[in-house]
């Protein structure tokens, strides 16, 4: 079985975060949302993955290299088709079994009655479209608010996906090369990526996600926020319920 990931969409609701990348490359903790999906597919034995590119295709190619193939439209034939900006821990094996048992030409996944950006397209000759209710996690990251929600759901264990870093205390994960020396206070749940610089007297209150290579200035106070990889938070900054990022750092 082949998988097709739709990564052509800029994601206007995430602008300006998606000025230089497609929505599928927006980071969720330690990797782009689409990379989480690639991992899900491969853990279920699907290695033939085609990515439909459009907006900023070179950004996708730089990240994934030759590990996937690239097309500009959905190829013909049977495939699992996933929107690239959907965060999911889908049981792909169970979905394919349900599709095969139904005999339908197409199976559309729904969550709580609403389509969730995942479907199976069958071979020619079958007929009909079947709606399949899934009990997995499935969230389209279409706005900064939904990006925060997805990141916090992954942080707090509501999404069954692997994430890098060592859990140094309950609800506190620290990436390689990062240190908590000198901070004034930290209240989990907090995920801090690799090679993050945190200034003295910083206050970090969860839920909080700080991406790889970010720099938090002295005395900064952060709560309920997502700091995207490579971003710098100036000293004495107070950020509550926000998303901070540098567009160039996402490329």
Image (cartoon, rainbow, N blue to C red):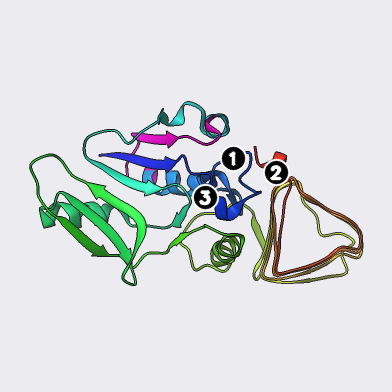
* Residues drawn in magenta: 42-57
Residue 169 seen in the figure: no
Q: Position of residue 105 (x, y in %)?
A: 15, 49
Q: Mark 3 or 2 closer to N-term?
A: 3
Residue 50 seen in the figure: yes
Q: What secondary structure is marked by label 1? A: loop
Residue 142 versus residue 66: which sits nearer the camera?
142
Q: Position of residue 94 (x, y in %)?
A: 25, 57
Q: Which residue does the numbered mark 1 point to in the structure image?
A: 21
* Total labels drawn: 3
Location of residue 22 with respect to 241 vertically, above or below: above
- In this view, the mark in front (3 or 2): 2
Residue 148 versus residue 217: which sits nearer the camera?
148
- Do the numbered discs 2 and 1 sit on residues whose CB atoms are within 8 Å? yes
Residue pictured at 25% horizontal, 39% vertical: 1
Q: Mark 1 or 3 closer to N-term?
A: 1
Q: CA distance from mark 2 to mark 1?
A: 8 Å
Position of 199 with respect to 95 (left or right) is right
Q: Position of residue 183 (x, y in %)?
A: 87, 64
Residue pictured at 12% horizontal, 57% vertical: 102
Q: Which residue does the numbered mark 2 point to in the structure image?
A: 247
Location of residue 2 with respect to 221 vertically, above or below: above
Question: Tag on residue 33?
Answer: 3
- Residue at the limit of the structure toward the top, as seen here: 66
């Amino acid at each position: 079985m082949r998988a097709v990931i739709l990564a052509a969409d800029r994601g206007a609701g995430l602008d300006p975060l998606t000025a230089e990348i497609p929505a599928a490359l927006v980071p969720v903790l330690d990797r782009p949302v689409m990379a989480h999906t690639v991992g899900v597919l491969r853990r279920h034995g699907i290695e033939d993955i085609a990515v439909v590119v459009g907006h900023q295709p070179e950004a996708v190619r730089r990240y994934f290299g030759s590990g996937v193939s690239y097309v500009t439209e959905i190829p013909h034939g049977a495939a699992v088709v996933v929107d690239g900006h959907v965060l999911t821990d889908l049981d792909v094996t169970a979905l394919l079994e349900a599709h095969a048992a139904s005999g339908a030409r197409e199976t559309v996944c729904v969550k709580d009655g609403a389509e969730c950006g995942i479907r199976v397209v069958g071979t020619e000759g079958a007929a009909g479209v079947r709606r399949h209710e899934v009990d997995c996690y499935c969230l389209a990251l279409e706005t900064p608010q939904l990006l925060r929600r997805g990141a916090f759901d992954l942080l707090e264990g509501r999404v069954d996906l692997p994430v890098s870093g060592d859990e140094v205390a309950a609800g506190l994960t620290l990436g390689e090369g990062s240190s908590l020396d000198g901070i004034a206070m930290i209240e989990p749940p907090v995920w801090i990526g690799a090679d993050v610089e945190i200034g003295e007297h910083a206050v970090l209150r969860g839920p909080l996600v700080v991406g790889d290579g970010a720099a938090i200035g002295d005395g900064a106070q952060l709560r309920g926020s997502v700091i995207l990889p490579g971003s710098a938070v100036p000293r004495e900054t107070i950020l509550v319920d926000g998303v901070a990022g540098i567009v160039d750092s996402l490329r």
